[in-house]
Image (cartoon, rainbow, N blue to C red):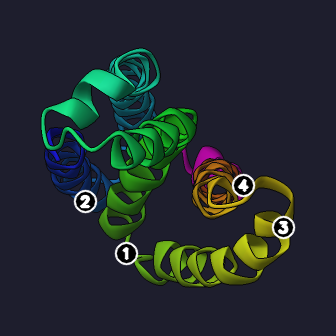
Amino acid sequence: MCYFYCNGELNGAVSSFVGQNFGAKKFKRILKGYRVSLILGSLYALFTSIVFIFCSEELARLFTQDSETIAITSSYLEIIGLSQIFMAMEMIGTGVYTGIGLPKIPSIISIIFTLIRIPLAIFLMPIFGLNGIWLSIAISSLVKGLLSVTIFNVIYRRKYQNAL
């Protein structure tokens, strides 16, 4: 919960920062702000990943003593822990796209790759059981984060790098 709150706030700050610099046509500052935000968000996500992966059982025990629930929750946190950095990349990318006036891009990425979780989970569940669902979430988050960064880099190089 704190993870989404902190990166959500970073998303809003990035959106405002990028929007202001976009309006002022300070495209180099947009890129610098984006990179700094990715570093900050990734560092926080790395911390979250470490906690999720190495303290998953302890976190689950905060809410229940049922051993089966703890096992399921622990598996979920360990698998999702692998994708936290990519989730941060996606969230920060959403702020950047909003700031440059292209909010449809993160919406399209999010809708398509969130929907892909369903068939991916159906494919992975016979192999990994319930963990197939968590893997589908982690894989789609990985793709959404990488796609968000890649598309921004392409747009930036084509539209704004030459405007400097």
Q: Amino acid at mark 3?
A: Pro
On screen, residue 55 versus residue 144, left or right, reads left
On screen, residue 86 versus residue 8, left or right, reads right
How packed mark 3 is, by other alpha carbons closer than 10 Å (few <14, some 14-19, many 20 or more), is: few
Q: Amino acid at mark 4?
A: Val
Question: Foreground residue, 23 or 109?
Answer: 109
Question: Foreground residue, 137 or 132?
Answer: 132
Gap between marks 3 and 1 measured at Cα: 42 Å
Residue at 70%, 50% (x, y): give it: 150
In the rendered image, which residue does mark 2 sit on?
19
Name which of mark 4 and mark 1 comes first in the sequence. 1
Q: Vertically, is 114 above or below 125?
A: below
Gap between marks 4 and 2 measured at Cα: 19 Å
Q: Vertically, is 156 above or below 3?
A: below
In the rendered structure, which segment of residues is drawn in magenta?
155-164
Camera-nearest label, 3 or 4: 3
Q: Amino acid at mark 2?
A: Gly
Name which of mark 4 and mark 2 comes first in the sequence. 2
How packed mark 2 is, by other alpha carbons closer than 10 Å (few <14, some 14-19, many 20 or more), is: many
In the rendered image, which residue does mark 1 sit on?
101
In the rendered image, which residue does mark 4 sit on?
154
Residue 125 quadrant: bottom right
Which structural element holds mark 4?
Answer: helix
Gap between marks 4 and 1 measured at Cα: 16 Å
User: In the drawing, what numbered circle is on residue 126?
Assistant: 3
Q: Amino acid at mark 1?
A: Gly
